[in-house]
Image (cartoon, rainbow, N blue to C red):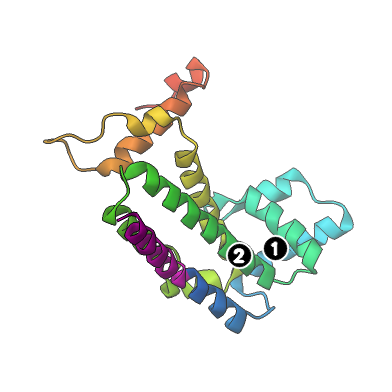
Amino acid sequence: MLQTEKKTWALVLLVGMLPPCLIGLMILKYAIDFPFSDQWEIVPLLVKKAQGTLTFSDLFAQVNEYRQFFPNLIFVYLGRLTNWDVRYEMLASFLTACAISRNVYLLGRKTFQGGGAGQMFAFLLSNLLIFSPAQYENWLMGQQLIFFIPILCITTCLLVSPRGVWNSRGPQKGEMADGILGCRLRRVCGALLLRLPKTAVSALDF
């Protein structure tokens, strides 16, 4: 029985690795070193970095309806190291997606007690979604790293949350089905809020 289970897991991992391998090959084949669309907005930051005039305000400046401080840091220093070869930005997006896949896999091990078919199916399905070729623009446009970083941060926070958060009571019969993840996420946020000053917590409406 144990040998059969090991073979089953090996097969699942093999099949689960097919989506990232497919995306990796697609990037290698179709990626070109030519900035496109919003990627040109990084140029002023690269110029200021070369001139030694880059400031915190430049990195934290608003872009459309958001601010991308940490992605800007990555773009600037990666651009300096690679002479702004945007294919390395695509590689950064791909590696970030791989890290997200790993987090989701480990979260599955925490969520599905005893493993089994449910965990295997969840891993396969998550990889099919994370590495979907339908989002080809995200894979072939390095600037789209800004969409992968928040997901990596959220899954990492869930992964390193206190163990008691995952062992706590989940949705019970008769409750609204906002899902196990919703309950767990609220408990993670609650656990993190306990470490904040009381004045900060009171300012939030739960």
Q: Quadrant of the N terminus?
A: bottom left
Residue 126, visible in the rendered structure? no
Tag on residue 42? 1
- Is 9 included in the stretch rendered in magenta? yes
Tell me the quarter of the picture where residue 168 sits: top left
Q: Do the residues labelled 2 and 1 touch (CB within 8 Å)?
A: yes
The kind of residue on which mark 1 rests is Ile
Q: Quadrant of residue 43?
A: bottom right
Tell which residue pokes out farthest to the top in this image. Answer: 198
- Across and down, in percent, residue 153 comes to 52, 46
Label 2 or label 1, whichever comes before in sequence order: 1
- In the image, residue 116 above or below residue 127: above
What is the secondary structure assignment of the residue under circle 1? helix
The stretch in magenta equals: 1-19
C-alpha gap between disc 2 and disc 1: 9 Å
Instruction: Classify residue 4 as left or right of residue 163.
Output: left
Tell me the crowding category of disc 1: few under 14, some 14 to 19, or many 20 or more residues within 10 angstroms, Cα based.
some
The residue indicated by pointer 2 is 143
Q: Nearer the viewer, mark 2 or mark 1?
A: 2
Is residue 80 highlighted in magenta?
no
Is 187 placed above or below 54 here? Answer: above
In-front residue for pair 2/18: 2
Vertical placement of 121 versus 176: above or below?
A: below
Residue 173: x and y in percent read 13, 36
